[in-house]
Image: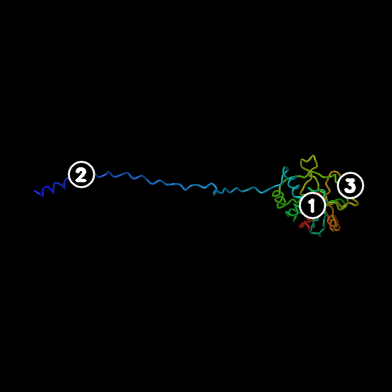
Amino acid sequence: MLLKKIALAAILLLFFGVGCKDEPQKKTPPIKKEAPQNDSLKVEVVEEEPFKLDEENAIEFFFDYQKGLTQNKIKITTSLGDFTVQLYDNVPYHKANFIFLAREGYFNDTQFHRVVENFIIQGGNSDDLETSKKRGDIGRYLLPPDTRKGYKHHRGTLSMPSSEINNPHMLASPYEFFIVVTKPGSYHLDGDYTPFGKVIDGMDIVDKINQQPVGKGDWPSQNIYIKKMEVLD
């Protein structure tokens, strides 16, 4: 009798144990948490376009450039020898422009592209691709004439020609220059072009360049190179 009771209790315990077992819970998939973004650590790389001179910024640029500019002499080494020019301090934009271009190496390996006997030698505007690329990298701009400082086109005067393209106001072509060879000078140029310096040493080299044979368009028959320009301290 005792064994029957024990067996019955075991059956009941087994029955209720199975019936009361919790149903398996559905597992919630893990939530992937994004690491907090720190905006201060985001670095946006912006490539700045290289600075170029143009009609809008050239005057302001050279106004700032000439501040504290104490140098006023430049040695010009050519394939026929070298000479030195001194720039006028009270023609600030043209002086600053010439020094800036010399320091940038623009004139190096350019040519005297126009030679008129007993009149002028003119340089700075070679027709080769490298010179054109230099101009493109520096920028395209003109300078206002500055003809009221009392300077005349005496022999040895360094002056800046005007651009011939859409230029009713005779704005100066900044990449070119000419030197007067005429004795005692070429005064018919006064008032139209801006004298901004003079040859102080090596005028015999300027004369030598002026005596070279030329072809059509006053272009020298043999290229006359400006090897380099050096701003002297």
Mark 1 Cα within 10 Å, few/some/many (few <14, many 20+)? many
Give the quarter of the figure containing the C terminus. Answer: bottom right
Query: Residue 207 appears in which quarter of the rendering?
Result: bottom right
In the figure, is residue 23 to the left or right of 194?
left
The local secondary structure at tag 3 comes to: helix
| Residue located 38% across and 46% down the image | 30
Residue linked to disc 3: 187
The residues bearing labels 3 and 2 have C-alpha atoms spaced at a distance of: 126 Å
Label count reads: 3
Label annotation for residue 123: 1
Q: Amino acid at mark 1?
A: Gly
Please, what secondary structure does the residue beneath circle 1 have? strand
Which label was assigned to residue 16?
2
Q: Upstream in the sequence, badge 3 or badge 2?
A: 2
Amino acid found under the numbered disc labelled 2: Phe
In the rendered image, the residue lying farthest to the right is: 184
Q: Position of residue 219 (x, y in %)?
A: 80, 51
For marks 2 and 1, give the CA distance: 112 Å
Give coordinates of residue 155: x percent, y percent.
88, 52
Viewer-closest of 13 and 38: 13
Q: Residue furthest left?
A: 1
- Of discs 1 and 3, which sits in the foreground? 3
Q: What residue is shown at x 15% (from left), y 47% (from top)?
A: 9
Circle nearer the N terminus (1, 3): 1
Disc number at residue 163?
Answer: none
Viewer-proximal residue among 37 and 179 = 37
